[in-house]
Structure formats: structure tokens, C-alpha cells
Image (tube, rainbow, N blue to C red):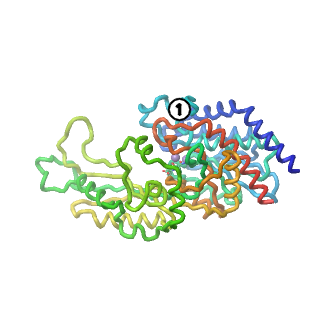
Amino acid sequence: MLLNKKIKMDFISNYIETNKERMLEELLEVLRIPSVSADPKYKEDTVRAANWMAEKLKKAGADNVEVCTTNGHPIVYGDKLIDSSKPTVLVYGHYDVQPADPVELWHSPPFEPVVKDGKIYARGACDDKGQVYMHVKAFEAMMANDALPVNVKFIIEGEEEVGSEHLEGFIKENKEKLSCDVILISDTSIVANDVPSITVGLRGLCYMEVELTGPNRDLHSGVYGGAIGNPVNALCDMVSSLIDENGHITIEGFYDDVLEVSDEERAAMNKTPFDESVYKKDLGINAVKGESGYTTLERKSIRPTLDVNGIWGGYTGDGTKTVLPSKASAKISMRLVPGQDSEVIAEKFEKHINNIAPDYVSVKITRHHGGEPVVVPLDFPPMQAAMKAMNKSFGKEPIPTREGGSIPIVALFESVLGAKSILMGFGLNSDAIHSPNEHYGLFNYYKGIETIPWFFKYYAEMSS
Ligand code: BES
Ligand code: MN
Ligand code: MN
């Protein structure tokens, strides 16, 4: 029996080795589809990407493959249910990508993938087409060798990058169909190719928009300037008061619910290999900045943040225009940490903004999508399977890390389906996700395909 199992793992790895080139070609094919979820111009392309994923799932051996239409972009579903007495893994990923702009900063067109220096350059190469496709290929390799040890379901959505609006309704309506014991997601990073890690925390998100209105029309800044409050000036004052000189967010009660991380965990976290001078150099900055009392590693993972994502108003065209604008706006997002709740923070933000707005402007606040933070306990048994799988494929014990990004559906999976997620990603922070020249290492793509069957094997063994 044991021997048989060992042979199966050898078959899987031979299969991957033999089919390497095709597995890459297929990924390049889907990277050519500009499935940008934010831009309605690409609506048909998102449908094309969904159909493509569904087709490949079917080919790999999945049953019940469906492209489920929603009021937004379609959701791809497929499964392979081998034995109802065995546990079920739900694999989640997204086929939608971020907009590619500014396109002029790409060294090669974002939707014409090229492989250069061992990396695949294309929008979505890492986030998340390359990572979700590793699962489809690992599944194919297990199926082809009659070595799928547990039940598996796939859900691949097309709206992750715009807040997973319709996936939430879908999981609520399809609880039975999506029922599972654990969710497996590759949409995060490892520390380095020789420092494997597993993500045990993600930040949440609260995304707001503020619009200030002053006079009822744009005014001549000479005729009225000095006597009338300028909403752009007011917005700048307000924004700059949101963070104090110690890097603390000044919104009343903002930190009330933050669960402080223990000194032990902080000490462990700060042992993660990290070279601040390399970090600064890569970003072209002279100095880092953040909340006092915390290291860079802590600031970008266990602490909440507030950032202006965009700010506009008045005249921004060529040359000059002497205008005292009627309106000013800003998009402001806050990353949240365990303990914080996006709705509560949204209320506190609204109250605070209304409090600090001067009386000569009126305020309109809009809430955009949000999401809750996530922590995955280390003693969760599938986590041990994931650790063991990474240890096997990297030849090194992975370290647990908390990451700063967000995957809002993870908290909803837990509250709606009652299942926790394993965040076993293979990207690198330097992969330029959401930026020009996004890329994904061939090493990482193949390492993912190699690691996933080990997760399934170890998970099945600990469940039997
Ligand atoms: N895959 C990322 C999230 C991520 C990246 C987590 C790197 C950890 C490390 C995901 O696609 C993403 O970009 N999420 C958005 C969520 C938002 C659009 C609701 C984010 O974090 O900004
Ligand atoms: Mn992603
Ligand atoms: Mn993303």
C-alpha cells in the first residue's frame, strides 16, 4: 500500500515533467485574454476567460463543470467527487485581472505574454491566472495517474479584483454545492524562492469616497479667491489630518478593536529575511515611513493603514486655469487587521469626516466594497498538511507569515460555508502584481504544480 502510494507520487512528478511545456503554453494562452473585471469594455473577454477555464477543468477530468452567470462576471464551477466518506477540498481562485494601465510603462504588451529570464511577463501572470492554473494542472496530473485522494471542488471567479460582489450571493445560494472541509487558495506570496512560507493572516479593507462641495459652480479665483472656502484646499487639510506625526490614524476609535499581536509572534515575524536597503532601492525611495514603534515588516502586515488612492478636483489639464473649484474628491482606503470590522470602521470614518469638515463645504461620503481580515490558526490540521507539502517540495520548513493584501471572500467562506482557508500562494512580493510588468517565475509556477498534489496526499492521510 505504502509502496503503491509512493509510486503514485513518482508518476505524478514524471507526468508534470513530461507535460511541462504544454502546461506553460496553456497558461500563456489564457494570459492573452484581457479579462479585466473593472472595465466594462472587456466584458466579453471575461466571459471568454471563464469559458476557457471551464473547458480546461473539463479536460483535466472535472465533472459538473459549469459557467454560472451572475449579474456580474461568470463564476466557473467544477468538481470531482470520488467518495462521500472522504473530505472535500474547495479550490478557489480568480481569472479576472487588474487593468493594465499605465500601458506605456510595460516593456512588452500586457496581454501578449513573453517568457524572459525565467519569468512569464503578462497582466495576471501571478495574480491570479498563473496561480489558479497551477491547481488545474496539479488536478490533471493527479487524475491522469488515478491519484486524487479526496474530493475536490473548484470555484474560479471573475470579480475578485473588484470586490467579489456577486460571489457573495452565489456562495449563500449554493451552500450545499460548495460544502467542503477546507478551502485551498493560491493567491498570495512566499518570502523568497529559497524561503518558503505560508500565509496565516490577511488584512481586511474598508474603501470610502469623499466628495466636498463648496460654491455651486467653479469660480474665478481672482474675483472670489480669499473670500470663499476652496474645497480642494479643505480636502487637503482634512486628508493630512487623518494621520499624525507618529503615523497614527486619528479617526476616533480607529484602533479600539485591534487585536494586538503577541511579543513572541512579533519577534518571530521580525526574523523573516528582509533587507530594508534592497526594499528601498527596488522602490526608488530614500526612506521608509510608517507608524512609530513598528518595523517595516510589521507595518505592512499586522498594523492597519489609511491611504489616499486618488484625489482630484479643480483644473488638472495642460497649462493653467485660475479657478476656485466647486468640488473636490478623494478615494481613501483603510487596510484592517484582525479584530477590526469594515462596517464599524466605515461608520467611524464617516462620523470623523463629517466632524472635521469645515462649515463652508458640504460632504458626501460613499462606501465602496470592503472585506474582513483573516487569521488561519497554525494548529488547524490542513495547515499541517500544507506545511508538510511545502517542506517536501522546497526541501525546507515554510515559515508562517501575515500579508498585507486582502482577499475579502476568505472571511465570507468562513462565515457562510463554515470552512477555513489555507493560503498556500507561490508568488513573490517582487512580481509586480497590479503594476506594470507583472510577472511570475517559471520556478514558482512549476513549484506550485509540484506542491499541490503533496498537499492532497498529506491531507488525505491525516483525514483517514
Ligand atoms: N491576490 C491579491 C491579494 C494579495 C496579494 C494577498 C498579495 C496577499 C499578497 C488579490 O487579488 C487582491 O489584489 N486583492 C485586493 C482586494 C480588493 C480588490 C477587494 C487587494 O488586496 O487590494
Ligand atoms: Mn489575487
Ligand atoms: Mn489582485
Q: Residue at x 29, y 67 (%)?
A: 355
The residue nearer to you, when weighing 439 against 288, is: 288
- Is residue 140 visible in the rendered image? The answer is yes
Relative to residue 454, is residue 463 depicted above or below? below
Check disc 1 and report the residue beneath it: 111
Left/right of residue 75 with respect to residue 62 in the rendered view: left
Furthest-right residue in this view: 1
Q: Is residue 69 visible?
A: no
Give how far across and how far down residue 323 sits, in percent: 19, 45
Amino acid marked by disc 1 = Phe
Residue 123: horizontal and vertical position, in percent? 52, 37
Q: What residue lies at 67% left-to-right and 63% top-to-bottom?
A: 380
Residue 151 pos. (x, y %): 76, 53
Rendered position, 118 above or below 183: above
User: As rendered, which of 267 and 162 lies closer to the eye?
Assistant: 267
Q: Quadrant of residue 255?
A: bottom left
Q: Residues within 10 Å of mark 1 (few under 14, many from 20)?
A: many
Helix, strand or loop at mark 1: loop
